Image: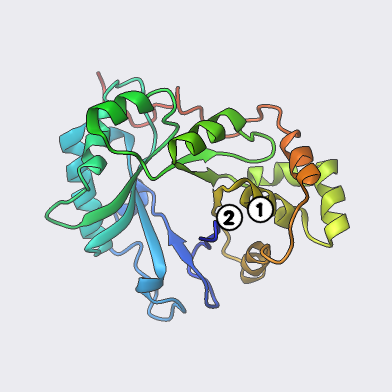
Amino acid sequence: MRSMSRSPWPSKPGTASLTPRPPTATRKASARPSPTAASPATSCSVTTKLWNADHGFSRALAAFERSAERLGLDVVDLYLIHWPLPVQDDYVETWRAPSSSCTTTAGSGRSGSLTSPSSRYGACRSETEVVPVLDQVELHPGFPQAPLRSFLTGEGIATEAWSPLGQGEILGDGVITRIAAEHGRTPAQVVLRWHIELGNIVIPKSVTPERIEENIAVFDFELGADEIDAITAIGSDRRQGPDPEQFDLGARSQ
């Protein structure tokens, strides 16, 4: 499987990955393709996410029903627990919802996934005996998350990177620009190729046709082991997004 997908609907044949955030998914048909979209619905992968206010078993199942109904889909490919929300301490009960196959009156989810499960994965697995398909985490050369990637690989869980280009801040790094020049590629293409070499699932977001084509043109060159190591060594714990162990936006009042 190629660890790359495009967002939003591609202008040419390819793979589309559609991930409406919960506030967005409350609008009916927000994830349905345009009548003029080049890719039919059968060629895209749809993920929907559980928002913080809907943690807990019954709330999570009800939230999934609402999402499936509003998306107008019988099957959602992946149901993602958006944030672990340790402040509520109900992660295991929340995980029971996707781990029960996400089957509801509105539809079903093929797979469940987590966000940063390493600190609570043991409890989820021992109490539900269900292994998540993937963990979606912030990951880029400035924040390579080597220990977490190693943990996930050992557990058979795929790693999906959000903010894979580090919001563009990492693209001017001298190591990346040098490697890009040597390969005749853009810095973004080098970073995306680095992700692929590491085995990450990476979804660069763009609405610009030229940028989408640039982002997908990373399967006809490779990086050497020394180049991969050099890019990984850039990492200096430069987290750009919220820390999942502390993020509690939208959490229910205790």
Residue underneath mark 2: 204
* Left or right, residue 108 beside residue 216: left
For label 2, the crowd category at 10 Å Cα-Cα, with few meaning under 14, some 14 to 19 and many 20 or more, is many
Q: Residue furthest left?
A: 105
Q: Residue at coordinates 83% horizontally, 59% vertically from top-left?
A: 183
Q: In screen coordinates, is 246 left or right of 220?
A: left
Residue 67 shows in the view: yes
In percent of width and height, residue 62 lies at 17, 44
Disc 1 marks which amino acid?
Leu
| Residue at point 76%, 45% (across, down) | 225
- Quadrant housing residue 161: top right
Side of 186 where 194 appears, left or right? left
Circle number at residue 192: 1
- For the point 61% across and 32% down, which residue is it? 146
Q: Position of residue 232 (x, y in %)?
A: 72, 37
Disc 2 residue type (three-letter): Pro
- 2 and 1 marks in contact (CB < 8 Å): yes
List x then y, in percent, for residue 98.
Answer: 25, 43
Using the image, determine if residue 224 lies above or below residue 18: above
Give the alpha-carbon distance from disc 2 to disc 1, as whole Å. Answer: 8 Å
Q: What residue is rendered at 60% in x and 32% in y?
A: 145
Left or right placement of residue 238 versus residue 241 in this view: right
- Residue 213 in picture, x, y percent from top left: 64, 69
Judging depth in this view, the residue of 208 and 212 nearest the camera is 212
The label nearer to you, 2 versus 1, is: 1
Q: Is residue 230 above or below residue 18?
A: above
The relative height of residue 11 versus residue 226 in the rendered view (above or below) is below
Q: Is residue 91 visible?
A: no
* Quadrant housing the C terminus: top left
The image's mark for residue 46 is none
Q: Secondary structure at mark 2?
A: loop
In the image, residue 60 above or below residue 210? above
